[in-house]
Image (cartoon, coloured by chain):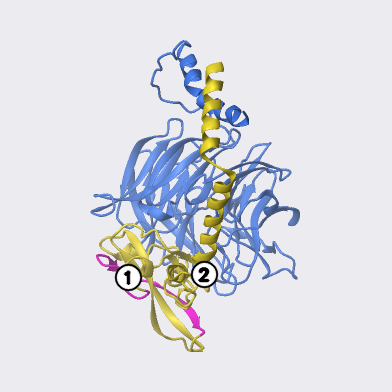
Chain colours: A yellow, B blue
Amino acid sequence: MRKLDQLCERSARSLAQRTSRRSLLASLGQLLTGAALLPLLPMDRAGRAQAAEAKPRADSPEDCQYWKYCAIDGFLCSCCGGTSASCPPGTAPSPISWIGTCHNAADGRDYIVSYNDCCGKSTCGTCDCVRNEGEKPIYRPSRNNDLNWCMANADVNYHCTVSVILGVAEK
Amino acid sequence: MRSARLLCPALSWPLLAAHALAAPPLPAEHLTMERLPPRSPHWVYVYDYVFDNEIDARVYLFDGDRYRRLGQIGAGFYASLNLSPDGGTTAVASTYFARGSRGARTDVVEFTDNTTLTVTHEILLPSKRALSVSSLFNLAYSPDGHFLYAAYMTPAASFGVLDPAAGTVLGEIDTAGCVEVIPSGHYRVSSLCESGRLLTVTLDAQGHELGRAMSEPFFDADQDPVFVQGIPTSRGNVFLSFLGEVHEIDFSGAQPTFTAPWSLVSAAGKGHWRPGGNQVGAIHRELGRLYVPMHEGGEGTHKDGGTEIWVYDLASHQRVARWPLKVHGLSRVTALQVSQDAAPILFAATETSDLAVFDALTGQLRHTTKHVAQSPWMLLNP
């Protein structure tokens, strides 16, 4: 173990001889100055803009709080290659669905929305969204979002869910 | 020298390793298969819905005393499951596709021996199984275990009567739009209807319909619907409503009888505190204790988990305890189950997929298992 001690000591002395405290301070100073300048560079602003876009706003169909999704339970097709009203390529829309009544703050109207599942591939697995305004248990199937609405398709595998405006809800 | 003292232990490991090489080698191991220990009342079956990959659901057997997983049962796509009345068998009704995520559909009930966790046999079903998130009443045994009832939905509602011992489908019973298979007597099956009534079908020993009866409405689906996740009692079931009304149904007579509903919340708290989650309560049948995950919220929050567990005495309808969860660092509780022994433990699955084990008499938290499953949806025990 003494030889190991001596080896370690030589290594430490060598490092000290090659490196001054002043050079350490200089390196730290460069690092801190660079960090301070970073927010001024155009690249940084662009990066932050991308970061802002990465999180959808509530008026985006990729956000669970989007007004049409008030009674949805599933993966948003908008995140899976489709849109809020179209199924992703290679899947098939369910001919049967459940419905919700959602308020659109932009025009102050309530709309009847049909929630159809897109079928034939396994779960999309992203943008899971569960909202239950007016949702009812399975004994009222037309308002139930716990069922796999691909049940009447040739391929019953569930992929994602769309929300399609059927019309303005009458008071 | 300070640097040397710091660096040297790091540099000395090859010497230590060489020293270890001088120790006797580990003995050769023999590959074996673990066997389950004798069944414990503190075991629970955790149904993992696996929401991100629904074709691969599973059931984990979890030991609530040692806080470890004991084994796994496969559950396929949109599974329904239940335990036989003697606890010896897990029945899983599931759907499989010929090529994994696509191809020909096969609906099947698979029976697993709970002493070995191996599949013993299966029953092929018509391709009309109800593809819904699971409750205790998508697949259920008759009290004597002679029949197994499987809910169908195409979306026309009906149920299959199966003979689990013979491995056969005996027949199909139309339920006129009413859903779920709730065992409600020797060979009787009840279903919940949109009208708030209970349809009860009586079968003969061969599984054929002898007769049916419709109850008076006992809830209002518009004003205050009941959760379909009923909770078994010693004489029937309890159904909770979205607003916290407790509907007790007695199945011990010739037809179901309904006691006057009572409320989990005071008049002032009604509509403010609510039950919610995927499995909205558990009952210790001998103690007459009801455990409910409760949260503060309005309309549309009926699937939100509880921030507290409220405990009730079923005989007096009085709340006897209120157990906040945040103090334990737990997220909202979405499923509850309680063991039925004299020293009961309460299992609570959370929205962040943890499984907490409480002393069901005192509310003392004994253990939390992090990420027990991907989507722990329902907890079962015999």
Closer to the camera in the image, A143 or B288: A143
The residue identified by callout 2 is A132
Marked residue nearer the N-terminal end (1 or 2): 1
Above or below: residue A79 compared with residue A6 = below
Amino acid carrying mark 2 in the image: Asn
Mark 2 lies on a secondary structure that is: loop
| Chain identity of mark 1 | A
Q: Are marks 1 and 2 on the same chain?
A: yes
Find the magenta span and give its range: A84-105
Can you give x and y, in whole percent of width and height, for residue B157 in the image?
39, 63
Total numbered labels placed on residues in the image? 2
Can you give x and y, in whole percent of width and height, for residue A164 in the image?
38, 78
Mark 1 lies on a secondary structure that is: loop
Screen quadrant of the C terminus of chain B: top right
The residue identified by callout 1 is A82
| Chain identity of mark 2 | A
Amino acid carrying mark 1 in the image: Gly
